[in-house]
Every structure is written in structure tokens, then in C-alpha cells.
Image (tube, rainbow, N blue to C red):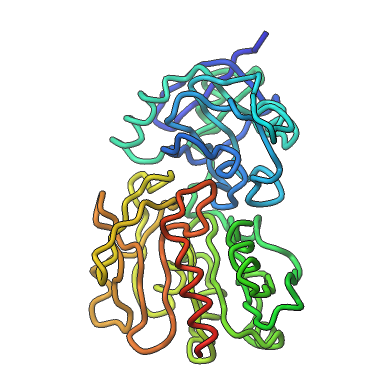
């Protein structure tokens, strides 16, 4: 029989439901994702570090867990909130249930929550700090934990998800891309490898000299969690290497590149998280449905007078989705073209990346 679990929010609200996963208490910023599928990819996405994830689609766990869908070496989210939990998954690749998956990585989960009500609250008031308990604790103590934790802007989350030493893949391929790792997803790595581009994954704080030692033909500034203004060494690296090679960015990478050229960043009210975000290319007029996961974005007003221009826009709220340098081979996107689990409308990002580095 499932035990009671509680989710406390900093505004004093407490949601009660049934526990699954690991018996513990975790804190984090409570956010919602709108994808009907992809809970494995989301839970293992390093960009969810420091956050308690809620799925708006009510049924979760129905197709189980496969390590083939992992985007990192394990769960990075701090907790998981769902409406209905399926404890008996059915899928040919399934290795375990969602509850067993969370238990393996010592992550708490709560089911039976009115996720529609919680989503409406987060849309109205913005993301809120929360505390999720799957073990006994008094309500007031849990509320104190929710309120007294540091905000997402105060934590160096990238340090918790990046590699601690170089990792080299595809050494026999004729081209080599350095990935400045702020929380890279496996699908991004695989997107380059399948195009026969070798990758050297380096910690985000690697010096320009260390990066150039690998003789890369281009650099990819990866996606990752938290406030981009805290990732100062990566920002400086882009400044130092901007004329040495093509530089591309994904998600947090776009924010880092923008900061390097003088743009400003702001925290969004509730961010974009899901696999159904429409993005318009301002040059071609084409619209792509994209996968996204970010709580910060570039201030478009701050681009005025800078050598970087807006290339793509989110059709839901008009926020920047792509930028390009006026003269240098530097560009980025705010969404996730690697698209785990999908859609694949924007997969051409990697083709363009490869063409650029080969032509440089």
C-alpha cells in the first residue's frame, strides 16, 4: 500500500498524495513540463538539476524505463510529481517501473496530485520553491524547508552536472568538436557522432588553452541547468575564442554566447518545458515544433547595437529562440534540436553545424 506524500510550496500551499520512489525529503524549484511522453528523458536531463519536476499529462509510467532513453548517467531532477502513476508498465524495451527507477536514484515521487491546479498556480504566480516528502514530517517543518532553501539563481548547478575530466568519443572521425559541458544531453552527443564528427567533452571551466590543445574544428556550448550569469568561465571562454573557430550553442549555450557579446538575461515567469513549443525562423518563415527546457532567456531589447541578431522566435510568447553573429560563424538556439524524445523538426541544426565547421 502506498504511503502518504506531501509537496509543500513557499506560498503555504501543501499538496497531499501517495508516495512512490525513494523515502526521503528533497527541495527544489517546482516546474511543469507539458509533454505527453518523455518522462525518462526529462528526469535524466541535467537541465532539471535543482528542480522538482511535474508532468502536466496525467498518466506517467505506462511504458516503463529503458536505459536507451537516458540523457545522462541517471536522474538529475530532485523529485517527480504526477497525477496518475502506472506501476505495471508495458513496453518491449522496459527494464523497470517508474517507481523502481526513482528508488534506484534515491528520488522521491508523489502521485494523486491535482496537477492541473498546480499548473495553473505556477502559471499565475511563476515557479515556486518547494519541498517534497515521502517520509513523515510535520507540515510546518516541510513548509520551512520549502521557504528557506536558496533560490535557483543562488546555486552553481552546472558544477553538479558537468564532466570532471575530458571525455573523448569518435577519435577516428576526421573532424573534432569540443563540447563545453554545462550539462550536455546524450542525444546532442549522438547527433554529432552519427554525422561522423568526433567529440571532446570538456568541463565548462576549461581554459582556452586547454580547449585549443585538442585542435578542434568547432565548439558547442551545451545546454545545462540554472542561471547562466553564474557560468562566468564559459562566458569568458566564448569571448576568448570567438575568432578562433565556429561556435554554436544550445539552450544555456545560447544564453552564455549572448552574455559574451553583451546581451542581458532574465528569469522567465514559468519557463518553457515540453516537446510542443512552436518556433518561427525569421528568415525562411518556417515553423518548427520543438523540445524545450529553460527558465531563463535572452532579453531581446538588449540585442540592440550588438553584433548578434535574432533569427528565431517563440510563437507562444515572442521570446528569442535563435541568434546569429553578424560576421563570425557563431550562432545558437534556445530550444533542444537533439529532441529527446522528440519532435525532430529541428534536427537540421546539427547538419548546419557540421556544414559550417567543414567550410570554415
Total labels: the figure holds: 0
Q: Position of residue 315 (x, y in %)?
A: 25, 53
As drawn, is 117 to the left or to the right of 15?
left
Q: Residue at x 75, y 69 (%)?
A: 167
Image quarter for residue 173? Answer: bottom right
Q: Nearer the viewer, residue 360 or 270?
A: 360
Q: Position of residue 112 (x, y in %)?
A: 50, 17
Residue at the extreme front of the image, as rendered: 92
Q: Residue at x 45, y 30 (%)?
A: 9
Q: Position of residue 2 (x, y in %)?
A: 65, 12
Q: In the rendered image of this protein, does residue 9 appear above or below residue 154? A: above
Q: Position of residue 256 (x, y in %)?
A: 46, 70
Image quarter for residue 1? Answer: top right
Q: Residue at x 74, y 65 (%)?
A: 164
Q: Nearer the viewer, residue 33 or 10?
A: 33
Q: In the rendered image of this protein, does residue 141 appear above or below residue 339? A: above
Q: Residue at x 66, y 52 (%)?
A: 72
Q: In the rendered image of this protein, does residue 18 appear above or below residue 320? A: above
Residue at the extreme top of the image, as rendered: 1
Amino acid at each position: 500500500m502506498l504511503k502518504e506524500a506531501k509537496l509543500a510550496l513557499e506560498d503555504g500551499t501543501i499538496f497531499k498524495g501517495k508516495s512512490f520512489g525513494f523515502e526521503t525529503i528533497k527541495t527544489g524549484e517546482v516546474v511543469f513540463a507539458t509533454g505527453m511522453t518523455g518522462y525518462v528523458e526529462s528526469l535524466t536531463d541535467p537541465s532539471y538539476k535543482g528542480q522538482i519536476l511535474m508532468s502536466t499529462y496525467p498518466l506517467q509510467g505506462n511504458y516503463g524505463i529503458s536505459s536507451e532513453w537516458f540523457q545522462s548517467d541517471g536522474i538529475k531532477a530532485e523529485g517527480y510529481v504526477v497525477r496518475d502513476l502506472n506501476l505495471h508498465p508495458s513496453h518491449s524495451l522496459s527494464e523497470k517501473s517508474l517507481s523502481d527507477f526513482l528508488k534506484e536514484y534515491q528520488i522521491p515521487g508523489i502521485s494523486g496530485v491535482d496537477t492541473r491546479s498546480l499548473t495553473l498556480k505556477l502559471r499565475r504566480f511563476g515557479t515556486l520553491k518547494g519541498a517534497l516528502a515521502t517520509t513523515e514530517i510535520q507540515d510546518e517543518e516541510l513548509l520551512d524547508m520549502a521557504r528557506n532553501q536558496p533560490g535557483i539563481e543562488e546555486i552553481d548547478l552546472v558544477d553538479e552536472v558537468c564532466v570532471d575530466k575530458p571525455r573523448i568519443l569518435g577519435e577516428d572521425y576526421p573532424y573534432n568538436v569540443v563540447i563545453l559541458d554545462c550539462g550536455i544531453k546524450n542525444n546532442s552527443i549522438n547527433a554529432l557522432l552519427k554525422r561522423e564528427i568526433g567529440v571532446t567533452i570538456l568541463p565548462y571551466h576549461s581554459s582556452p588553452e586547454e580547449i585549443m590543445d585538442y585542435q578542434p574544428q568547432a565548439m558547442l556550448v551545451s545546454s545545462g541547468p540554472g542561471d547562466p550569469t553564474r557560468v562566468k568561465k564559459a562566458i569568458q571562454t566564448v569571448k576568448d575564442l570567438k575568432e578562433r573557430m565556429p561556435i554554436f550553442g544550445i539552450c544555456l549555450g545560447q544564453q552564455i554566447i549572448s552574455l559574451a557579446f553583451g546581451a542581458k538575461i532574465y528569469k522567465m515567469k514559468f519557463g518553457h518545458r515540453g516537446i510542443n513549443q512552436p518556433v518561427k525562423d525569421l528568415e525562411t518563415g518556417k515553423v518548427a515544433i520543438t523540445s524545450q527546457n529553460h527558465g531563463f532567456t535572452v532579453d531581446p531589447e538588449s540585442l540592440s547595437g550588438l553584433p548578434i541578431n535574432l533569427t528565431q522566435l517563440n510563437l507562444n510568447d515572442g521570446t528569442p529562440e535563435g541568434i546569429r553573429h553578424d560576421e563570425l560563424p557563431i550562432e545558437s538556439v534556445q530550444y533542444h534540436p537533439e529532441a529527446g524524445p522528440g519532435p525532430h523538426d529541428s534536427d537540421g541544426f546539427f547538419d548546419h553545424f557540421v556544414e559550417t565547421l567543414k567550410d570554415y
